[in-house]
Amino acid sequence: MTEGVPDKDQIIPVDTSVHFIDCSDAWPLLTKEEQLYAYHFTRASWEGAKICAFQRSYESPALVVLLRAIFAEGHESLKKKALSQGLSETEWSQLVVYSAATLQNIGNYKSFGDKKFIPELSPDKFLAVVKASEAYKKYQGPINDIWKAIEPVLYRVGAPFNVLGFSNENGLTTYYSAKVAKWEAAKLKEFQEETKISPLNTRLIKLNDTTYWLRIASAEKGNLPYVKTHEWQGLKIVVENGEFAQIMKRVADHLSECLKYADNENKKEMMKEYVEHFKYGE
C-alpha cells in the first residue's frame, strides 16, 4: 500500500519512449575476433550490473528477478494474459514502462537523482499479471515468496523511502548498512585512502559503535595485504573480499575471454588489469 502521496516524478509516464539501438548494420562490419571481444565485454558488463540491484534497495534484487521472469515468455504473450485478467491498455502500459524503468536502472531508484519511482498500476492488478504468467506456473512458491517480501515496500513513499541516502538524513540505501551515518562513511573513507582500498567496489556494514565490516566485491578471497582486521583510530575494521563472488567470477571469466580477442597491447594490458581487479578486488 502506498503511504503518503507520490511526487509527480515518482510515476513513470505511460508515454515514456523506449529507444532501440540497432546494431544490425554495424555488427557484420566487425571481424569475428572483434565480435567476440564485444560480446564478452557486454556479457561481463551485464553480469556486473546485477550487483547494482543489491546496492540500490532491499527490494531491488527480487524485483528485477520477478520482472525478468514474467516477461521471459515474450511481450505479446504476457500482454494477452494481462488483458484477459481485466487490465486496460493503459494499465498494461503502466506495467511496461515501470518494468522498463526498473530494468534500465537495475532497481526501483533512478540512477540520476537517486529518487524512488513506484508502479502506477495498482498492487492487485500487478499481482494478477504475475499470477497469469508462465513463470508463475513453474515457480509459484518462490514467486509468492518474492511478492510477499517486496510488495509492502514497493509502493511506499515518503521518508526514508523517497531517496537513496544515509538514514540520519532521511534516506535509504543498501550500499551502507542502515545504521551508518554520513560522518561515519567519511571517516571510513579516510581509512580506505590510507590503506589504498578503492571505495568503488565496497560495501560498509556497521556492527556496533566501534566495529565495521568493509566488504570488497571480488571473485576470490584473500591474496591482498589489507584483507584482515585493522585497529585504526580506536575502531576495529574487518576487511574482507569475496562479496558477490559468483557474479564477480562470471565478470572475470568473460573479461578473460576478451583478452583472447584483444587486437592491440593496450587492450590486452587493460583486460589483464580488469581481470586481476575483479578476481581479488584490488
Image (cartoon, grey):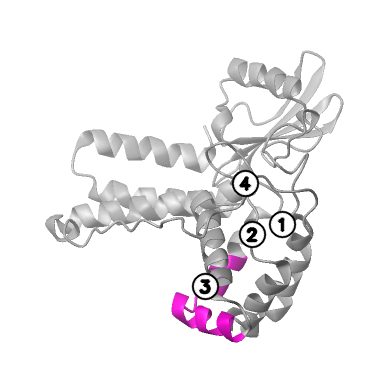
* SS class, disc 2: loop
Q: Between marks 2 and 4, how big is the CA–CA gap? A: 12 Å
Which residues fall within the magenta stretch?
Answer: 66-84
Check disc 2 and give the amino acid type.
Pro
Residue 187, percent from left and from top: 71, 18
- Which of pointers 2 and 4 indicates the residue nearer the eye? 4
Vertical side of 233 occupied by 23: above or below? below
Check disc 1 and give the amino acid type.
Leu
Vertical side of 109 occupied by 144: above or below? below
- Which of pointers 3 and 1 indicates the residue nearer the eye? 1
Which label number is shown at residue 107? none
Say whether disc 2 or disc 1 marks the residue closer to the N-terminus. Answer: 2
Check disc 4 and give the amino acid type.
Lys
Check disc 3 and give the amino acid type.
Phe
Disc 2 vs disc 4: Cβ atoms closer than 8 Å?
A: no
Report the residue marked by disc 4. Answer: 8
Report the residue marked by disc 2. Answer: 119
Q: Between marks 1 and 4, how big is the CA–CA gap? A: 17 Å
Residue 52, percent from left and from top: 56, 46
Does residue 83 appear left or right of residue 28 in this picture? right
Q: Report the residue at 79% width, 48% height from top.
A: 4
Residue 247, percent from left and from top: 54, 53
Q: Between marks 3 and 4, how big is the CA–CA gap? A: 27 Å
Q: Report the residue at 54% width, 47% height from top.
A: 219
Say whether disc 1 or disc 4 marks the residue closer to the N-terminus. Answer: 4
Say whether disc 2 or disc 4 marks the residue closer to the N-terminus. Answer: 4
Disc 3 vs disc 1: Cβ atoms closer than 8 Å?
A: no
* SS class, disc 3: helix
Q: Report the residue at 70% width, 55% height from top.
A: 59
